[in-house]
Amino acid sequence: MTQDAALAGTDTGRVLVADLDGTLLRSDMLHESFWDSVARDPRMLAVALLALRRGKPALKASLAARASIQPATLPYDPRVIARLQAWRAAGGRTALVTATDTRLAQAIEDHLGLFDEVHGTEAGLNLKGWAKARFLTDRYGAGGFDYMGNSAADLPVWAAATTAISVNAERVTRAQLDQQSGGQAQHLLPVRGQRDAVIRALRPHQWVKNILVFVPMIADLAFDLATLMAAMLAFVALSLTASAGYVLNDLLDLADDRSHPRKRHRPFASGALSAATGTWLFPVLLGAGLLVAGLAGPLLLAVVGLYFIATMAYSIKLKQHTMIDICMLATLFTLRIVAGGMAIGVPLSVWLLAVSMFLFFALAAVKRLAELTDLQAAGRAVTRRGYRVEDRSVLSQMAVSSGYLAVLVLALYIDEPVVQEKFGAPWMLWTVCPLLIFWISRMVMVAARGEMHDDPLIWALETRTSRKVMAVVAVFVVLAVVL
């Protein structure tokens, strides 16, 4: 698209009209305001449902009144901004006309300063599709505007415009627009990599946490095919359910993630995926996870359901409370072990569950320690969860003491007669204890230095020393079984 083609309408007095959702903005303000409101007050779920009964304009107005959207952090499409700037520089007029509530649209214009007019959804009028086409024709006259939009709902608007410009439209929509315009439409093609963005949103690297479902199988030395398949069902069910939780967490954390130096690159925060995509992706993943769990039996389904409820409670409310968030993270890890036990039908050792709680409490404390270290480096003092920079030393002590307690309980577990009888060379298991002490001590030190990833698990998998420790631990466990 040449510069002359882009500015051809300025001499005729045509107005360049831009849509907001999916066009100027690489997201959707209805869903953005919904998740922002729910993150601040979970009761907004009920408020939104009641407002929806009065129609979409009422829902949008209700969310706009309660949401606290920061226009400066929203993911805009730079190509649309550049075109609007060029149009205005050539003397043309611009307008933002959107189905988003007028208050939110005006707040975005106040930040960008790109438009001469702003029109959005108001009481009784959802400015979308045919309603938008009639509004623009009445205001600017037939052929008095060019229009940039993104969805099939914009086809009536493009039909009324002199120049139709699609932005990030799907292939089917672009084909319909080409047929409607006789091939005269202009297209700003979607940025490639949406499939990769979906995969990143699922965080498949986090599924490694669900290997914990195999711990009861290993502890019981039950390696038959039926047991392995049952544990695999637990792994898949938890992985899908966990991904649903990650999507939910990212939607609720949009505002915080966009102000974070690393998390702002996450798919939903960066605009690589729209909040609207996350709104349907979340229930699909959850439904699939519960379905797989149900195939393994009611006990696993109950544990996976409990895991999701705990995840949801954590994402919506509990993670905002000091110390409760750390305890919840440890509980979520331990539930993975419980799920493995329920899947294969073996009783779980209290010793094993205690090791899990202590160890993963330590990991959660390290996670918060790393966040506070980053916060201090950025010159900020308090997190949304209520932790302060001066809490770093306390968190460090908690991580070390809890980690060492996990090792102590593991030693007591290894000394149990039942364990001694199960393993051919149980003395090999004793070597695991000093290795874990080294690993925990190093992890806490790295976090205190500000060299830790946001997630200690990612650090554990990506760091050479950590991988070597885990490999040696695995070797000694295998030798304890086979010798």
Image: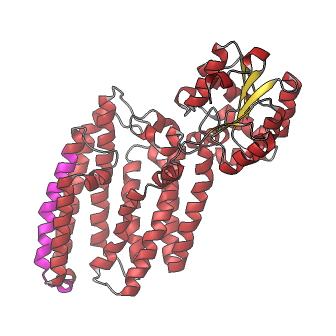
Location of residue 160 with respect to 202 vertically, above or below = above
Quarter of the image for residue 259 reads top left
Q: How many marks?
A: 0
Q: Which residues are magenta?
A: 420-445
- Relative side of 154 to 427, left or right: right
Quarter of the image for residue 337 reads bottom left
Identify the image quadrant of the C terminus.
Answer: bottom left
Quarter of the image for residue 83 reads top right
For the question of whether residue 461 can be seen, the reply is yes
Q: Residue at x 11, y 68 (%)?
A: 431
Identify the image quadrant of the N terminus.
Answer: top right
Q: How is the image coloured?
A: secondary structure
Viewer-nearest residue: 421 or 292? 292
Q: Main secondary structure of the magenta part?
A: helix
Magenta stretch: includes residue 385: no
Q: Residue at x 75, y 40 (%)?
A: 183
Viewer-nearest residue: 36 or 50? 36
The location of residue 52, given as percent across then percent down, is 77, 46
For the question of whether residue 42 can be seen, the reply is no
Location of residue 145 with respect to 213 vertically, above or below = above
Location of residue 292 with respect to 154 vertically, above or below = below
Viewer-nearest residue: 7 or 53? 7
The location of residue 181, given as percent across then percent down, is 79, 39
